[in-house]
Image (tube, rainbow, N blue to C red):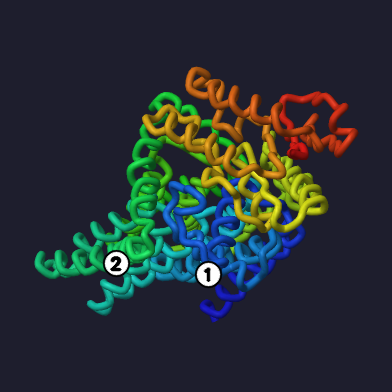
Amino acid sequence: MKKCLSWIIVLSVIVAASIIKLHLLNISLERDEGEYAYIAQLLMGGTPLYISAFSAKLPGIYFFYAFIMALFGQSSYGIHLGLLFVNAASTILVFLLARRLLDPYAGALAAAAFAILTLGKYTLAFNIEHLVIFLVLGGFLLMLRAIDRGAGFLSTGIVFGLAFIAKQHAAFFVLFGALYLAWAPPVILKERVKKAGLFLAGAALPFVALCALFYMQGVFGNFWFWVVTYASRYCAVMTFPDGIRSLLYVGGKIAGCAPLIWGAAGVGLVAIGASRLERPKAVFMLGLAVTSFLAITPGLYFRHHYFIFLFPAAALLVGAAARPLEAPRPRKVVLMALFIIFFALTIFQQRQFLFGMGPIAASRAIYVNSPVAESVEVANYIEKRSGKDARVIVLGSEPQIYFYLQRKSPVNFIYMYPLMEKTPYAPGMQERFAKEVAAANAEYLIGVHINTSWFNWYVNKKLTEPLFGWIEAYQNRYYDVVGVADMVSRDETVYRWDEDARQYKPRSDNYILVFKRRPA
């Protein structure tokens, strides 16, 4: 009866969370989503990775996006519908893991905590982290089962290897899995080393297979440069004090979306040490919490979506706080009621965002000063006035525009960040980018005048001003303004097209200009 009731609670939570998200499925894609969708679009068309669109990310997310878009369609709605299913599957995996480590009731509460954390406004985009934790949760369940059976460590490692080829940060979970296997019984050291070795061999297989694939496709050099050589430089840019400030600022916003749940997780952290939980289970839960935190730290870039890595560990800790070990029935009921109130208050706290906003208002509330909804309007304008073969170049880091247009970029740089960062590669990249733009003779240029689209260019003016000077001269020589999207406030964007655009002067510091090439 207990097992059946816990499943009913979990499935009810999944249905409720999905219903809450339904009206926001059509929210416009943000930059990262636009990158994944655009490159997946190229992949579906037969274009090899790392040759027509440069990216420092490992390719797992592109393959998964291609799979999702093949199932649900090439639209923001279809992509977010795919995320709905991934979140539902991850919620079930949290339940199964918490049930194994704690008990069915604690598992149901952990699943509810996880589902509510995924409702936060900073985690609604289909970022890589959602895919990684889905794979990692499945991997940990397989690992614990493999420990019981004494077999299956190689296949378990492969699941973690798939998480790694989605995002480099998953290496922390791979390392934790290997260390846990080397620590866990049996006591014979040789057996522990064998288990950990098989696990690590399995974890390496997906990456080795990828390297072989890219070598055969002739793109291994590009792949290695972007995901290893350049990525290592990128991670060295942020200073430690800036990183700490970012952690406190962004972490505060994440915690502010669900303070009661994060508080309960803190209680659970203490409860693990005070309870009679078996030592292997306590070590696993504490180790997962530490590992999850380490997974958000590389490069000291604390993006909002990085904190998704913490959600499963936090949910398990909530389950530990609620674990009614050897408690009388009245106490169990009171404990369950208390947590239900916590969950209800967390949703109530976010009521305006979850229930009172449509897709456009929600995107503006999440992505302040980012042209998320505006990208759709700009793409619609160009699509209506140009043929499918017309070339379009986005001068900014807004790859979602290429996705909406469903056409290939004439340039390989879909992000401007590598051109702006203080690395040895930036000057050469700027030169290459300028040559690609000039050679393309694009019919339309989209100039994004938004700081975040250029990685806060003003920090490195000496590095960036030559490129900006070239772009301005090139635009003035060959193009006329035919469109303006002026983001005058969080709630209002002024659009002007064709002749009206030529006469309009932007009122804000954040705007997009659409240029059309003059007839020769």
Q: Disc number at residue 92?
A: 1
Image coords of residue 395 (percent x, y): 63, 37
What residue sits 82% from the left and 50% below the top?
Answer: 385
Identify which residue is drawn at 71% across, 62% down: 77
**Marks 1/2: CA distance?**
27 Å
Which of the pair 299/151 is nearer the observer? 299
Q: Is residue 267 left or right of residue 285?
A: right
Above or below — where is 79 with respect to 236? below
Residue 108 in sight in this render: no
Assess disc 1: are there few (<14), some (14-19) or many (≥20) residues with their C-alpha within 10 Å of its C-alpha: many
Element on which disc 1 rests: helix
Quadrant of the rendered structure where residue 102 is? bottom left
Most distant residue in the right direction: 500
Q: Quadrant of residue 60?
A: bottom left
- The residue depicted at 80 percent of the width and 29 percent of the height is 488
**Callout 1, which amino acid?**
Ile
Can the viewer see residue 6? yes
Q: Nearer the viewer, mark 1 or mark 2?
A: 2
Front residue of 187 and 133: 133
Disc 2 is placed on an element classified as helix
What is the number of the mark on residue 81? none
- Kind of residue indicated by mark 2: Leu
Q: Which mark is residue 205?
A: 2
Q: Residue 422: image x %, image y %?
A: 42, 27
State the residue lying farthest toward the top: 462
